[in-house]
Image (cartoon, rainbow, N blue to C red):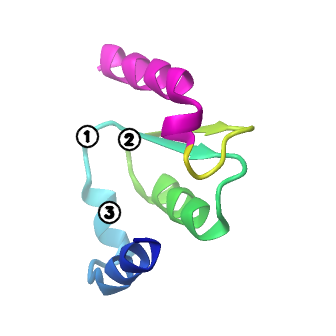
């Protein structure tokens, strides 16, 4: 599965600058202990998207939606309510 995900990302033919045209408010959540390639994607998008809020869960790893579900849910609800 992981190999397929990275292969899929490799095939994306969208120039990074095109992401600046994504207008909806966006919430990016990353685990402080996640894998570097995954974190790099979040960091790059965080610098490109015009209306983005980033949040890092310091003790979370790659599977934070499962290991830190209460925190993730709180952040998503706050994001939706703010909109």
Q: Nearer the viewer, residue 75 or 67?
A: 67
Q: Residue at x 25, y 58 (%)?
A: 21
Q: In which quarter of the image is the C terminus?
A: top left
> Pointer 2 and pointer 1: residues touching (CB < 8 Å)?
yes
Tell me which corner region of the image, top left, top right, bottom left or bottom right, holds residue 17: bottom left
Tell me which corner region of the image, top left, top right, bottom left or bottom right, holds residue 18: bottom left
Answer above or below: position of 26 versus 79: below
Residue 82 highlighted magenta (yes or no): yes
Q: Residue furthest top?
A: 81
Tell me which corner region of the image, top left, top right, bottom left or bottom right, holds residue 76: top left
Residue 69 appears at what percent x and percent y? 51, 28
Q: Which of marks 2 and 1 is nearer the N terminus?
A: 1
Q: Can residue 54 be seen in this view?
A: no
Tell me how far mark 3 sits from mark 2, CA to CA. Answer: 11 Å
Q: From the viewer's perspective, is 46 left or right of 14?
A: right
Q: Quadrant of the N terminus?
A: bottom left
The numbered dot on residue 19 is: 3
Residue 73 highlighted magenta (yes or no): yes
The residue tagged 2 is 51
Tell me how far mark 3 sits from mark 1, CA to CA. Answer: 11 Å
Range of residues picked out in magenta: 64-83
Q: Which of 20 and 77 is in front in this view?
A: 77
Tell me how far mark 2 sits from mark 1, CA to CA. Answer: 7 Å
Answer above or below: position of 5 versus 29: below
Q: Can residue 14 be seen in this view?
A: yes
Q: Earlier in the sequence, mark 3 or mark 2?
A: 3
Q: Which residue is drawn at 66% across and 36% down?
A: 57
Residue 49 appears at what percent x and percent y? 39, 53
Q: From the viewer's perspective, is 54 left or right of 31?
A: left
Q: What element carries label 3?
A: helix
The residue tagged 1 is 24
């Amino acid at each position: 599965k992981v190999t397929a995900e990275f292969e899929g990302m490799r095939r994306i033919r969208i120039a990074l600058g095109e992401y600046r045209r994504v207008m909806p408010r966006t919430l990016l959540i990353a685990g402080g202990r996640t894998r570097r390639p995954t974190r790099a994607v979040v960091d790059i998008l965080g610098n490109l998207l015009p209306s983005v809020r980033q949040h890092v869960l310091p003790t979370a790893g790659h599977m934070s939606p499962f290991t830190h579900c209460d925190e993730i849910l709180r952040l998503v609800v706050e994001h939706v309510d703010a909109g």
